[in-house]
């Protein structure tokens, strides 16, 4: 799987490359600023890009902006954004094109290598992966939202895990229930959120978006 | 002129004063009141002010007398007494002028009198330029008051008299009201006196149109003479700056101590324990790989906790989203994670200076968390706006945090609002709370902002 990395700190860039290569990814280019990132994405069109939010030259949210810009030009280009901090406002902006294939994780999630590698693969496959911090903040916040108020605690849990990018099988394993139960829950969630049955993956993204946008 | 005051004061004073009511009246500010009621209250105040000027003249006379007999000894207590009375009278006038003009005229701009003997106190009073300005004002006021309040009163009185002239003519003994405009013009019958009635509305109209302006003129004279001198103003400003600097330095030092402690007890300790786990794992790896793996997993957990702590610490110092997106973005991000639905309205020209952004952000964040914790609100509204300042160059950033909660918030009740006030004071900012019991609550903050 071909990967582009954008990270300005050499130490972290090397660490990421090492982890990804050890897990069978091919790092086609590693850049350290926003402009180079867009150029690299246009040239290589990787299977997934791993991008730090804060990049030179502005050292603000250059990475995020570059990622959004690249996706405007290559719709649905899978991007995994890493950040020292997670902000819901950024999660929302990332997902706003509703094309899926985005991830937004705290940088230290990388230390759980298996989970991180799985997340990268999910994003490459078109799923949405949100950091548990974003999801838990949403769960507390959205408890007042009438549309989400209709969800049972179990369904909340399923939606939270769904937002973390887990498959039905993974959710089932995590909740100690059968996969069938999970798909029953998720259908009920889609119905309560008023999402019409179409492509299943897309509905998962929309459900997560419903959370993010309230 | 004095003749005239003798005829009007006793008759008209008490009812007018009752109408005008106690306390500051005739406010040109936001309280809506009918134009007529305003003018009637000004009429009442005219009488009060005229009485005040008579009192002032008496005080001036007593003072001059006591100064001239100060050498005899008895004059000194008399000077102190009259000075106290003059200051009281001047403060009342300052208050009146401030209410009238809607601009604060600081009360009591005098140098503090020492707790020493009579002579020392006398010396301080005599040296204080504010004392001499008070006396100048007493003298000037005894003249200008007639040109403002007196004239206004005269217009009104003439209006009423001319309007009712036939009645007055009829009711009073003959000869008294025969010459309404001096000897040159003599009335011979009630019928003739009716010719004067049209003058009544003319004078009343004159009174009506000039009353507010004359009162303002009077207030300006008071402000010009009784307002603080440039020196007094600077002294007060220096004092205020010294206080706020001391508070800022205290807060800063406290903040640094807190950061140091948090780093020492949190992240640093975790990194040490991480090193220990790794060292032990390294040692165990050949003998007991399973235990080593366990230790490595723990070590990884430890880095996560250390990072979480560092993140919270950095957020407390300067939130990254504020650095990235400025005040507007940071407040929107804040509202987004808020358990109570919160709307954010900003009217900002772009990025503000970093210290202002930071101070504004923390002030709003604290006010918001106060509302979440205590107000039991269902809706919170944040409005942030940069208004160009009255003087032109600098602007004023106003921040409004309002909720529909139960109200009853006050600066004195907790540390939250007091803390915001202190933070803002370092930037010359202010905080005002409007929170009647039962709500709604409105916290209004402002920061002067040099752009």
Image (cartoon, helix red, strand yellow):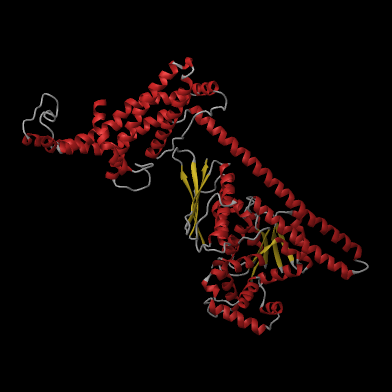
Q: Quadrant of residue B311?
A: bottom right
Q: Is residue B39 visible?
A: no
Residue B306 image position (x, y, % from top left): 75, 58
In this view, the residue farthest toward the right is B287
Say above or below: B428 vs B287: above
Residue B89 image position (x, y, % from top left): 41, 31
- Nearest the eye: B127 or B72: B72
- Nearest the eye: B98 or A71: B98
- Nearest the eye: B215 or B111: B111
Q: Is residue B390 left or right of residue A168?
A: left
Q: Is residue A23 visible?
A: yes
Quadrant placement of the N terminus of chain B: top left
Q: Is residue B45 left or right of residue A125?
A: left
| Residue occupying the point 39% across, 35% down | B97
Say above or below: A186 vs A95: below
- Nearest the eye: B52 or B217: B52
| Residue occupying the point 36% across, 25% down | B57
Residue B189 image position (x, y, % from top left): 6, 33
| Residue occupying the point 70% across, 54% down | A8
Q: How many marks?
A: 0
Say above or below: B81 vs B170: above
Q: Quadrant of residue B18?
A: top left
Residue A180 image position (x, y, % from top left): 65, 85
């Amino acid at each position: 799987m071909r990967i582009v990395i954008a990270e300005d700190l050499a130490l972290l860039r090397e660490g990421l490359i090492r982890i990804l290569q050890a897990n069978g990814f091919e790092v086609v280019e590693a850049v350290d600023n926003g402009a180079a990132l867009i150029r690299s994405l246009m040239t290589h069109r990787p299977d997934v890009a791993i991008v730090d939010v804060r990049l030179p030259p502005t050292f603000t949210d250059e990475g995020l902006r570059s990622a959004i810009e690249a996706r405007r030009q290559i719709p649905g280009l899978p991007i995994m954004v890493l950040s020292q901090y997670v902000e819901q406002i950024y999660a929302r902006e990332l997902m706003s094109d509703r094309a899926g294939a985005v991830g937004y994780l705290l940088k230290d999630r990388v230390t759980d290598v298996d989970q991180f590698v799985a997340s990268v693969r999910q994003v490459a496959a078109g799923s949405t992966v949100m950091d548990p911090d974003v999801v838990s903040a949403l769960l507390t916040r959205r408890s007042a939202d009438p549309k989400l108020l209709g969800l049972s605690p179990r369904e909340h849990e399923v939606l939270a895990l769904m937002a973390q990018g887990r498959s039905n099988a993974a959710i089932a394993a995590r909740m100690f229930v059968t996969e069938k139960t999970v798909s029953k829950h998720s259908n009920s969630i889609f119905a309560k959120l008023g999402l019409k049955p179409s492509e299943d993956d897309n509905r998962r993204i929309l459900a997560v978006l419903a959370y993010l946008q309230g | 002129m004095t003749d005239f005051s003798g005829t009007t004061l006793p008759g008209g004073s008490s009812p007018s004063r009752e109408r005008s009511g106690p306390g500051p009246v005739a406010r040109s500010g936001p309280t809506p009141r009918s134009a007529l009621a305003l003018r009637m209250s000004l009429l009442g105040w005219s009488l009060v002010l005229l009485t005040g000027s008579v009192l002032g003249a008496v005080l001036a006379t007593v003072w001059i007398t006591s100064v001239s007999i100060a050498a005899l000894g008895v004059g000194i207590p008399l000077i102190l007494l009259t000075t106290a009375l003059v200051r009281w009278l001047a403060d009342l006038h300052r208050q009146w002028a401030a209410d009238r003009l809607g601009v604060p005229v600081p009360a009591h701009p005098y140098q503090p009198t020492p707790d020493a003997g009579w002579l020392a106190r006398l010396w301080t009073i005599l040296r204080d330029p504010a004392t001499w300005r008070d006396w100048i004002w007493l003298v000037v006021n005894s003249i200008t008051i007639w040109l403002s309040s007196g004239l206004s009163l005269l217009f009104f009185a003439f209006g009423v008299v001319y309007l009712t002239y036939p009645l007055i003519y009829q009711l009073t003994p003959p000869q008294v009201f025969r010459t309404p405009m001096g000897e040159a013009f003599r009335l011979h019958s009630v019928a003739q006196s009716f010719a004067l009635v049209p003058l009544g509305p003319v004078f009343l109209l004159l009174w009506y149109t000039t009353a507010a302006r004359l009162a303002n003129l009077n207030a300006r004279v008071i402000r010009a003479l009784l307002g603080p001198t440039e020196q007094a103003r600077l002294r007060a400003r220096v004092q205020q700056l010294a206080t706020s600097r001391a508070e800022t330095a205290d807060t800063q030092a406290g903040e640094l101590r807190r950061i140091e402690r948090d780093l020492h007890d949190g992240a640093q300790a975790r990194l040490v324990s991480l090193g220990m786990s790794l060292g032990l794992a390294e040692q165990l790896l050949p003998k007991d790989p399973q235990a080593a793996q366990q230790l490595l997993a723990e070590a990884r957990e430890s880095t996560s906790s250390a990072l979480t702590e560092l993140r919270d610490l950095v957020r407390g110092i300067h939130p990254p989203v504020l650095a990235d997106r400025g005040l507007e973005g940071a407040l929107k991000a804040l509202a987004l994670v808020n358990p109570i639905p919160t709307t954010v309205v900003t009217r900002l020209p772009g990025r503000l200076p970093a210290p202002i952004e930071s101070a504004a952000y923390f002030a709003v964040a604290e006010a918001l968390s106060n509302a979440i914790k205590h107000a039991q609100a269902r809706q919170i509204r944040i409005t942030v706006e940069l208004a160009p300042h009255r003087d032109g160059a600098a602007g004023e950033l106003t921040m409004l945090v309002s909720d529909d909660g139960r109200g009853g918030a006050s600066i004195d009740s907790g540390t939250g609002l007091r803390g915001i006030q202190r933070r803002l004071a370092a930037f010359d900012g202010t905080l005002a709370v409007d929170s009647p019991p039962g709500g709604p609550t409105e916290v209004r903050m402002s920061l002067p902002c040099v752009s």
